[in-house]
Image (cartoon, helix red, strand yellow):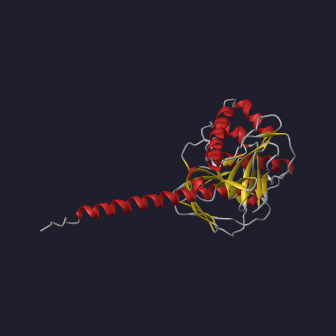
């Protein structure tokens, strides 16, 4: 029988919590230990929670979305402790389900923000305060995220995929969360003019691939700044530095304008689906980081081996 806070359980080393494609009847919170999460569309990633950590990691959220099968195989890399929440006979009102979805989404969004450069130095309390203010939006190849002349009313964090930044047909930059830049954290954009009255976008941003984006509205950003007032200066400094670098590269002015046409609104997806997408994006990023680290280590070892062989090779003496 499930208690209000779930049931504590343990998973032995190498034990399988669930397999990809299996029916889902529970979700879990990892409170201690390390697990491997492997799916068909991404390399295996390792998720770890240190003993005594205040924040656990949710797993298996598919069980809350009405019959969705498991999206990955999760197995223990060491002895793990979890809290299990059965959902087969779980009866929740729409209000309680919405509150649960909000909590789960906020927790998964916190993990994504910790991997975003401008947010990663915030305290746990500050991250919790801003995470619940985000929505998740999805864009298809060729779809506009925003256009030049539109309102500067949202901040965007690219979870996965790739977007292109252009002005009057000229390419300015690509932000890529599939390779490269994602190894240093999630790229973010849309900061220019965010707090200036009637400021308008100075360029176009369009999705180059299927992309998942966390979106913070202007109203949410203002609420967040009331709790972290010095964040505005940090964000402004970054936006100015990147704008000047882009201007040097493209030879165009990227200053925000004022006044102009409105742009079409996009719609966020629901919280449970959003939490699943954020989790998948985090797993992919962690897996790429681990793969990159292993590759770097192999390259270093290869160089060291070649140097050692060269030193051991006898020197030819001239007659």
* Towards the viewer: 123 or 172: 172
Residue 127, image quadrant: top right
Task: Report the number of numbered marks.
Answer: 0
Residue 68, image quadrant: bottom right
Q: Is residue 272 visible?
A: no
Q: Is residue 230 visible?
A: yes
* Towards the viewer: 235 or 241: 241
- Residue furthest to the front in view is 251
Q: Residue at x 67, y 36 (%)?
A: 236
Quarter holding the C terminus? Answer: bottom left
* Towards the viewer: 183 or 236: 236
**Residue 135 position (above or below residue 209):** above
**Residue 257 position (above or below residue 312):** above
Q: Position of residue 155 (x, y in %)?
A: 74, 44
**Residue 271 position (above or below residue 220):** below
Q: Position of residue 224 (x, y in %)?
A: 74, 35
Residue 35, image quadrant: bottom right
Q: Position of residue 216 (x, y in %)?
A: 76, 44
- Residue furthest to the left in view is 319
Position of residue 215 in the picture relative to residue 53 (left or right): right
Q: Residue at x 66, y 57 (%)?
A: 281
Q: Position of residue 15 (x, y in %)?
A: 56, 63
Position of residue 319 in the picture relative to residue 147 (left or right): left
Quarter holding the N terminus? Answer: bottom right
């Amino acid at each position: 029988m499930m208690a209000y806070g779930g049931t504590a359980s343990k998973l032995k080393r190498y034990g399988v919590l669930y397999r990809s494609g299996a029916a889902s009847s529970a979700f879990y919170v990892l409170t201690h230990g390390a697990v491997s999460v492997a799916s068909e569309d991404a390399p295996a990633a390792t998720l770890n929670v240190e003993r005594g950590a205040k924040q656990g990691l949710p797993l298996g959220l598919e069980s809350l979305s009405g019959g969705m099968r498991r999206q990955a195989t999760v197995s223990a890399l060491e002895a793990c402790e979890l809290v299990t929440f059965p959902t087969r006979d779980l009866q929740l009102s729409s209000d309680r389900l919405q509150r649960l979805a909000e909590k789960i989404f906020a927790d998964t969004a916190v993990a994504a923000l910790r991997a975003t450069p401008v947010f990663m130095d915030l305290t746990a309390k500050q991250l919790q305060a801003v995470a619940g203010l985000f929505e998740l939006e999805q864009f298809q190849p060729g779809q506009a995220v925003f256009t030049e002349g539109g309102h500067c009313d949202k901040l965007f964090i690219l979870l996965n995929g790739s977007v292109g930044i252009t002005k009057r047909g000229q390419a300015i930059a690509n932000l890529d969360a599939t390779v490269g830049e994602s190894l240093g954290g999630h790229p973010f954009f849309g900061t220019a003019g965010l707090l200036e009255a009637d400021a308008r976008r100075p360029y176009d941003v369009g999705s180059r691939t299927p992309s998942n984006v966390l979106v913070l509205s202007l109203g949410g950003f203002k609420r967040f700044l009331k709790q972290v007032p010095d964040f505005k200066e940090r964000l402004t400094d970054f936006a100015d530095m990147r704008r000047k670098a882009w201007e040097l590269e493209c030879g165009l002015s990227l200053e925000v304008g004022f006044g102009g046409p409105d742009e079409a609104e996009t719609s966020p997806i629901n919280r449970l689906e959003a939490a699943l997408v954020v989790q998948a994006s985090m797993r992919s990023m962690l897996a790429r980081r681990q793969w990159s680290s292993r590759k770097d280590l192999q390259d270093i070892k290869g160089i060291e081996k070649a140097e050692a062989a060269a030193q051991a090779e006898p020197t030819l003496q001239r007659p």
